[in-house]
Image (cartoon, rainbow, N blue to C red):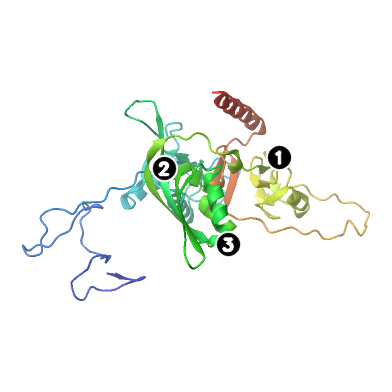
Amino acid sequence: VNRGISRVPLESQIAYAGDIVTLTGVPDSIRVGDTLTGGTDDTAIFRPLATPPLAPPTLCMEFGANDSPLAGTEGTEVTPTKIRSRLTAETDNNVTLNVETSKSDSDKTTVYARGELQLGILIEQMRREGFEMVISPPKIVTKIDESDGKTELEPFEEVTVDVDSEYAGYIVSALTGDRKGVLLEMHEDVDAKTRLRFEVPSRGLLGFPSEAASATRGSAVVNHLFLEDRKHVGPLGDGLEKGKLISSESGKATHYALASLSSRGTLFVEPGDIVYPGMIIGENAKAGDLEVNPVRAKATTNMRTQAKDEKTYLPPPKRMTVEELIGYMSPDEMIEVTPNTLRLRKAQLDPVERRKASRIKKQQQDSLRKK
């Protein structure tokens, strides 16, 4: 039986409610939700205990083989078949995951999960096992209302946030603005803490936990639970979309080039990191994407002046975890996962194709606004 972080023998042969007991000799036919009972009439349970229903998946992402210019340079498991086999094996232990072949690309695998944290843990496990892959942006699992057959439904979640009272205003503004949440309850405790309860679309929570932790200096504790499927509330606010700095050249990033780019936004790479065209190297301080050259070297001349030899300060790069990248990435981007590196890149590496896709997206948004 588990006692804290240790596993000790069950000396009294009696386990109580809440104990986690490990058994040996259990057949493979046993599944989550089954009831194990004693063999005698005094201790036997003749009716199985009711299994609580599992919350349905709210997010899905597509896993595929790495197709970037750096593919195969770090990982050992790189083929779509091995990636799909590993994901299918995960469903034996994790009953809340669903895996199926992608409908848009037979070489990719779609994984349905209950949140970005669950997907982030799975990706990190595969990364440490030597897998190399690319992951598409998260999509909300929507349904069609059976009553009329045409109304689109999306998952809503109940969100509870415990935060220092001085940051309560920020939390309310963040969830009820672009994220389309509704504040239900606000209660202030005596220890300068405030408890806030919201109802928010699941897609409005993408990236919020890490954003709240940074803005509140780690004082915010965010908990969310699936509520129900409701009518789709429309597109989220434009304030959630971030402009990116995109590399236009391949090679190693130089200190000289990054120093000049640091004033344009927040950098994700440091001198010596390998970049390629279409790779995102930072966040643009202004709206919209900007293509830059991070491998530009300083011109060498025979002239020496005090200004040319002046040392330049380069701020440290911003490093994000898998969960943070899942909530941060835009719909036209992908995460490149290798055992040693996490990279954010555009799905279309060709700049010409990206411009075409951007024009089509803008036309679709304009037509939706007119409707």
Residue ID at (7%, 63%): 40
Residue ID at (49%, 44%): 181
Q: Quadrant of the C terminus?
A: top right
Q: Quadrant of the N terminus?
A: bottom left
- The kind of residue on which mark 1 rests is Glu
Q: Give the SS element for disc 3.
A: loop
Res 211 visible: no
Residue at label 1? 291
Res 200 visible: yes
Label at residue 156: 2
Q: Position of residue 73 (x, y in %)?
A: 57, 49
Depth check: give the residue in front, 27 or 162: 162
Residue at label 3? 217
- The kind of residue on which mark 3 rests is Arg
Q: Give the SS element for disc 1.
A: strand
- The kind of residue on which mark 2 rests is Phe
Depth check: give the residue in front, 94 or 197: 197
Q: Position of residue 158 (x, y in %)?
A: 41, 49
Of label 1 and label 3, which has the lower sequence position?
Answer: 3
Separation of marks 1 and 2 at Cα, in angstroms: 37 Å
Residue ID at (77%, 59%): 313
From the viewer's perspective, is the residue at label 1 or at label 2 nearer? Answer: 2
103 vs 277: above or below:
above
Q: Quadrant of residue 246?
A: top right
Residue ID at (54%, 53%): 171
357 vs 95: above or below:
above
300 vs 105: above or below:
below
How dense is the environment of label 1, judged by Cα within 10 Å: few (below 14), some, or many (20 and up)?
Answer: some
